[in-house]
Image: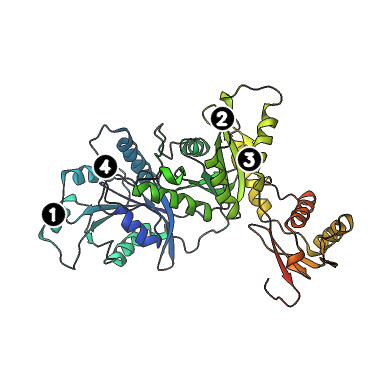
Amino acid sequence: MTLPIVAVVGRPNVGKSTFFNKIVGSRLSIVEDTPGVTRDRIYAEAEWCGKYFALVDTGGIDTDTEDVILSQMREQAEVAMEMSDVIVFMVDGKEGLTAADRDVADMMRRTKKPLVLIVNKIDGGKTPEDFYDFYELALGDPIPISAANMTGLGEALDAIIAGLGDAAESEIDEDIVKIAVIGKPNVGKSSLINALVGENRVIVSEIAGTTRDSIDTPFTYEGERYTLIDTAGIRRRSRVTENIEKYSVVRAIGAIERSDVCILMIDAADGVTEQDKKIAGLAHESGKGIVVAVNKWDLIEKDNHTMEEFRRKIRAELPFMAYAHEIFISVTGNQRVKSVIEAAAVVAQNRSMRVPTGQLNSLIQDAIMIKQPPSDKGKRLKIYYVSQVGVRPPLFSFKINSRELMHFSYARYLENRIRESYNFSGTSIKFVFREKGDESL
C-alpha cells in the first residue's frame, strides 16, 4: 500500500530537520546549525492517531542563488513538493517574516497542493508580536510550534492529517525490500539510484561527500516494490573531521542496519581497497544480503578472462563473504544497471528461504558420514539435531554434545554442504550451537 507523502519545505535553517526527527521518532536527518546541511530528500514513515504517511525532509530553498549545490537543493525541494499530497511550509518565528519566505510561498501556491503553515521556534509559550505577520502569506492560519521543545506538534499533525483526508492510510506494508547502496565516496552510488528510478532523485556531483544523509527512495520494478537507500560514502576514520561528516558515517551504518540487501559498489579502476573491506565487513557482520557491484567496468581494458580474474580477486580480498553475488556494471554507460535490482531481488528471496527440518537433518547426517566430526582426547563431536530457527539472515540451530568440539573449520564445512544443496547465494548463514540441557534457541 503506497503511503501518501508530506513534504517539509522552507528556507535553510528554519528547523525542518528537527521537526522531521521529532515526528518520525528517530534522528534520521542530520541536525546542525550550518545552513544547507540537509541537501537531499529524506523519507521516513510517520504515524498520527492511527494514520500513516511518508514524511519527507528537504534541503532549504534558496530562491536567489547560483551555487551549484544550493541550486540542486532547491530542485530537490521542488520535486518533493511536486510528488507530495500535502506540503508543510516551515518558517522561523524568531526571525519573523522575510522576503525569501514570500518567494517560497509564491512557489508553493503554484503547486495547488494542500498547505500547512508552521511557525517554528516559538519557545516559552509566548507568541511574538510579529507572529501575525505570517497571515500576510495567505496560506491559512499559521500554527506556532517549537520543534526542539516538542510543543505544538499535535496541532501541526492534526492539520497534516486533515490535509491528507482519505489519502492517509490506516496500515503500512512491511514486506517492501529495503536495499542500501553502500561504498566509499564517489564510486557512483547516487548515480546508480538515479539511473534505476529514471530521474535525478539524488544530488550527483563530482565533489566527494556530496551525499551526507541516508536517503530513501520508493521504487517499483516489474510489479515489485522496493526502498532504495542512498548513503553517504563511508571514509576512513582518520579522514573524518567535520561533525557533519561524522554524522554521515553513523547514518550510513544505520542504513546498513535497517536494510535487507546491501549493494556494495566498488570502483573497477581501484579494485578492492582497504576501505571497501571495512564497509563489506559492516554489512557482513549485520547479516545482510550482499551484491558486489563493480562500477565503471567500461573503463577497463578487457579480454576473455578479465571478468573472471577480477571475480577471483574479489573473493581473495573478501574471503569472509565468498557468498556475495558479483555483478559488473557501468552506470554512466548504462550497462547492466537493471541487473543490479534483479540480483538484489534474488538475494532478498534467498535470505527468506526456509529448509524443511527433515531435509536439513538428512543433509547433515550425509555430511557427517562423508567427513567425520572432530574429536579431542578420545571425545568426538556429536550432532543430534538441526533446525532452521530464523530467516533474514537464515539461522540454524545445532543440538550437539560439546561446543568446544565444534571447530570453526567443521562449521565451515557444514555451511558449504548446506550451500551446495540450497541456493543461499548472496546471504550469510548464521549457526548457533547448543548443548543438551541448553534451552536457548
- Of tags 3 and 4, the one toward the viewer is 3
- Of tags 4 and 2, the one toward the viewer is 2
Q: Earlier in the sequence, mark 3 or mark 1?
A: 1
Residue receiving disc 3? 317
- Where residue 219 sits: x, y (%)? 52, 45
Q: Residues within 10 Å of mark 2 (few under 14, many from 20)?
A: some
Circles 2 and 3, Cβ within 8 Å, touching? The answer is no
Q: Residue at x 49, y 35 (%)?
A: 188
Disc 4 is placed on an element classified as helix
Q: Earlier in the sequence, mark 2 or mark 3?
A: 3
Q: Earlier in the sequence, mark 1 or mark 2?
A: 1
Q: CA distance from mark 2 to mark 3?
A: 22 Å
Circles 4 and 1, Cβ within 8 Å, touching? The answer is no
Residue 141 located left or right of residue 387 = left
Q: Amino acid at mark 1?
A: Asp
Q: CA distance from mark 1 to mark 2?
A: 53 Å
**198 or 352, which lies in front?**
352
Q: Amino acid at mark 2?
A: Ser
Residue 110 located left or right of residue 198 = left
Q: CA distance from mark 3 to mark 4?
A: 52 Å
- Of tags 1 and 2, the one toward the viewer is 2
Circles 3 and 4, Cβ within 8 Å, touching? The answer is no
**3 or 303, which lies in front?**
303
- Where residue 232 sits: x, y (%)? 44, 44
Q: Residues within 10 Å of mark 4 (few under 14, many from 20)?
A: some
Q: Earlier in the sequence, mark 4 or mark 2?
A: 4
| Res. 96 mark | none
| Res. 133 mark | 1
Residue receiving disc 4? 107
- Where residue 102 sits: x, y (%)? 19, 45
| Res. 330 mark | 2
Q: Residue at x 53, y 38 (%)?
A: 196
